[in-house]
Image (spheres, helix red, strand yellow):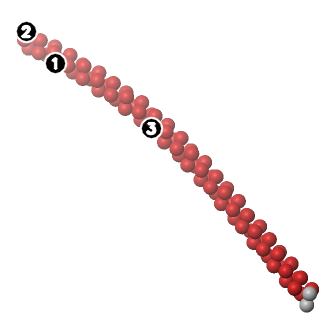
Amino acid sequence: MEKFDQASEGLQITVKETGELEKRANQAGVELIKASDTLRAIREEVKDMERKRAKQERLLRDINQVGSLCVGIKRTQELHQTIMYM
C-alpha cells in the first residue's frame, strides 16, 4: 500500500509539473508570436524607410542637376553680356 501511495503521489507531482511546463510553453509561444509580429512590422518599416530614402536621394540628385543648369545658364548669360560690352 505504501508503494501505491508513493506512486500516486509521484504521479500527481508529475501531472502538476507537466501542467506548469505546458503553461510556460504556451506563454513562450505567445511571446514568440508577439516578437514575430513586431519583427515583421519593423521589417516593413525599414523597407518603407529605404524606399523613402531612395526617393529623397533621387529628388536631391534632380535638384542638384537643376542647380548646375542654373549656374551654367547664369555663366552663359554673364559671358554673353561680357562679349556684348566688348
Front tag of 3 and 2: 3
Does the residue at mark 1 contact the one at mark 3 (Cβ under 8 Å)? no
* Residue that label 3 marks: 35
Could you tell me which quadrant the N terminus lies in? top left
Task: Residue 62 in the image: state x and y as whole percent.
Answer: 73, 64
Q: Which mark is residue 24?
A: none
Secondary element at tag 3: helix
* Residue that label 1 marks: 10
Residue farthest toward the front in the current orientation of the protein: 85
Amino acid at circle 2: Met
Residue farthest toward the bottom in the current orientation of the protein: 86
* Residue that label 2 marks: 1
Task: Residue 26 in the image: state x and y as whole percent.
Answer: 37, 27
* Distance from Cα at disc 2 to Cα at disc 1: 14 Å
Task: Residue 39 in the image: state x and y as whole percent.
Answer: 48, 42
Disc 2 crowd, CA 10 A, few/some/many (<14, 14-19, 20+): few
In this view, the residue in front, 44 or 5, is 44
Could you tell me which quadrant the C terminus lies in? bottom right
Q: Quadrant of residue 15?
A: top left
Q: Give the answer, above or below, for where 79 lies relative to 70.
A: below
